[in-house]
Amino acid sequence: MHDFPFRRVHFSSSLIDALPDAIGAVAKAVSQDERARAGTARSLVVMGASEVLRGSGALVPDWADSETAYPILADVPEPALFQLPTILRVHKPDQRIHVTRDVDAVKRQAIALTRDHAIEGIVDAYLVGRDLRVILGDMRVRSFPAEEVGCLAQLGDDELRSFEIQSSGSYLLWRELDLRVGASQLLQAVDPTYLAEVVIERYAVERMSLALRCLREEKGLTQEGIGGLSGRHVRRLEKEAVRLTSDAARKYADAFGTTLDGFLAELARCISRLEREGDDRRGQTHEEGPNLAGHG
């Protein structure tokens, strides 16, 4: 797991029992792990509404705080759901409580926690007008206007509403249109920084470092010529001491006088060229064979 998104996690025992065995085992394992993970302030509590109401919040873990997110399975009538924010002492329920009647949402949340990047798992989704709201595995709500997602922009309102969520949360499915859209595809459409991270992670550090140096030299820039980055940091990037980030990539793009997308495209082409040259050199060495001069 590269980026586990929660400090602590709790799935209620009744919801764990309702999950398929393998997925339930994952939910149970993360629930029993009492370590407070560094790097995030948010926690996660997954319960049924009836459990919260019946126990008046007593079943909620002691460590739940103002940063805790609550995916709640709505297994009670609608009027009872209005009590949840008071019992859970949540003053901004739209930011921290997500209520759903979709039992599979609990399963999708557990599966998202097994992914290298939890935000690439879809827990739930709904439409507000033509604005697609998607709850990803980190339990944050992202907004994706249909007009900004190329494959959705041309859909009529009725077509847009006809989606379902694939059972493991890998993608949204418009079955009659044979259209599948994953979380990564949605994120890339509206967030170029996310796309930058995807491209950066694709390549080995040594190829990335060499490509950065080659591109900088082709542009006639010194190591001190990347605005916003110190010469020392550029040297470390080119010596494989640190990994390129999307923020640093944006600074390279500015220094090169191009967009972030343009810089990433240049970087990809340069890395591909370096890989081809490396393959050619290895091929030539193999064809020449070992040097046997001087041996009888």
Image (cartoon, grey):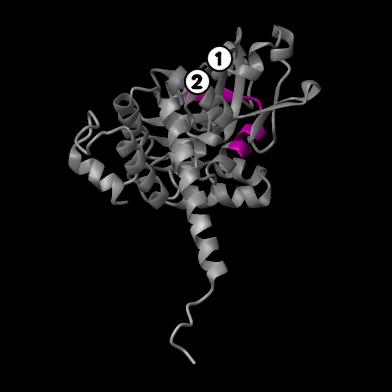
Residue at image coords 78%, 21%: 177
Depth check, front residue: 282 or 95:
282
Question: In the rendered image, which residue does mark 1 sit on?
Answer: 148
Depth check, front residue: 93 or 179:
179
Q: Amino acid at mark 1?
A: Glu
Q: Position of residue 101 (x, y in %)?
A: 65, 25
Depth check, front residue: 235 or 10:
235
Q: What is the C-alpha distance between the residues marked 2 and 1?
A: 7 Å
Q: Is residue 287 above or below residue 87?
A: below
Residue 96 lies in magenta, yes or no? Answer: no
Boundaries of the magenta span = 97-108
- Earlier in the chain: of badge 2 and badge 1, it is 1
Residue at image coords 35%, 33%: 249
Question: In the rendered image, which residue does mark 2 sit on?
Answer: 190
Q: Crowding at label 2, few (<14), some or many (≥20) Cα neighbours within 10 Å?
A: some
Residue 106 lies in magenta, yes or no? Answer: yes
Q: Is residue 290 above or below residue 59?
A: below
Q: Amino acid at mark 2?
A: Val
Q: Is residue 34 left or right of residue 233?
A: right
Residue at image coords 52%, 16%: 82
Q: Is residue 159 above or below residue 90?
A: above
Q: Crowding at label 1, few (<14), some or many (≥20) Cα neighbours within 10 Å?
A: few
